[in-house]
Amino acid sequence: MKIGLAYDLKQAIAAPVAGPDDTLEEYDSAETVDLLAAAIRSAGHSAVKLGGGREFLENVLNTSVDFVFNISEGRGAYRSRESQVPAVLEMLGIPYSGADPQTLAIALDKPLTKRILQTAGVTTPKWHVFRTPDDAKNVDWAGFRFPVFVKPAFEGSSKGIRVTSMVATPEQAEEQVSALFESYGQPVMAEEFIDGDEVTCGIIGNLGETGAEPLVLPLRVLPRQKTGPFIYSVEVKRNYKQMVDYEYPARLPQPVLECLKEQALLVYKTLGCRDFSRADFRISADGTPHFLEVNPLPGLSLDSDLFIIATAMGWGHERLIRSVLDAALSRYPQLCG
């Protein structure tokens, strides 16, 4: 089978001169793309690099591929940017890996995702959305518990999540909202801070017609030095080898683990995630998992949380990619003939 690779390389995108230093955080390296191509070839397929943006459009129109393995994050600062490549592939009738455009567009809108999931029964911290900088001056904080966590409403890959994101007063929240508007130019949200264990749940596979469920893989993130509330910020993720330890499987009480897996699967099912995903939770003092956000297009680099989980399971990178690919191809039995 000829499998195309859709991706966006950091070096292919010009960062705005005045933008924040994490502007390109979500994009991939050539090393990651080469590893994916090698894994696809090891499964007996040929791999064709399609790239991203305009390059992707030209290549996918001029190259006949049977299937696309998609890790493209999309272009621009649009909240639906991750759905760009899957939408084109659906228009052209080309099957692909991962979530569909609707799931990807919803998941990058964090307040909308929380509203949908809360309705479905997922526990998530209380939140406010600020559509303009002035909204923070007029918000009614009654019933809202401080400290709160302030972050951009339409970002992934921990963009805009810093050690300064947690604030203790409405005045500090107003300042942080204003700063994020200036840096990211988009709505901002404030969320009640849950001071507990940070757990990210990787998911690989799909729901089967016979009731089979995907693998749900909880990973606990443990700071090496805890001098205050832990924030799994972009700074920590960039220096994770020095700043945190990972525990897989998370050694949490069995009832907490069961509830965590149940909530992670409910997120997966409700949003229509496919093949692979990752959802982040905080565990409060009473053992309740609180959903923070979901990434239906998680990173697959050697530094990604999903690869850290795979390593702890005794998997190599090739097995991780082939597992995602197998899950995706199983949705298209006509291709596997």
Image (cartoon, rainbow, N blue to C red):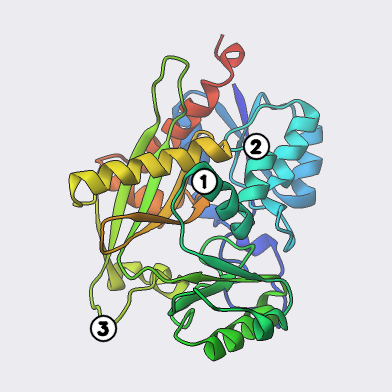
Q: CA distance from mark 2 to mark 1?
A: 24 Å
x, y percent for residue 276? 48, 39
Residue at 49% x, 74% y: name it: 144
Q: Which residue is mark 1?
A: 34
Residue occupied by mark 3: 227
Drawn side of residue 334 relative to residue 311, left or right: right
Q: How far is mark 3 from mark 2, CA to CA?
A: 41 Å
Q: Quadrant of the N terminus?
A: top right
Mark 3 or mark 2: whose residue is earlier in sequence: 2
Depth check, front residue: 315 or 97: 97
State which mark lies toward you, 2 or 1. 2
Image check: 275 left or right of 5?
Answer: left
Q: Which mark is residue 52?
A: none
The residue shown at (59%, 47%) is: 116
Q: Which residue is mark 2?
A: 100
Residue under the image location 46 percent in, 34 percent down: 324
Is residue 134 found left or right of 41 in the rendered image? right
Q: Which corner quadrant of the image does residue 304 belong to?
A: bottom left
Is residue 9 visible in the rendered image? The answer is no
Gap between marks 3 and 1 measured at Cα: 40 Å
Residue at figure coordinates x 48%, y 23% from the top left: 44
Residue 95 at what x, y percent from top left?
A: 66, 27
In the structure shown, which secondary structural element does the residue marked by tag 2 occupy? loop
Q: Quadrant of residue 240?
A: bottom left
321 shown above or below 67: below
* Label 1 Cα crowd, 10 Å radius (few <14 / some 14-19 / many 20+): some
Q: Quadrant of residue 86?
A: top right
Tally of numbered tags: 3
| Rendered location of residue 274, percent (x, y) | 53, 34
**SS at circle 1:** helix
* Vertical order, 221 against 173 (above or below): above
Closest to the camera, between mark 3 and mark 1, is 3
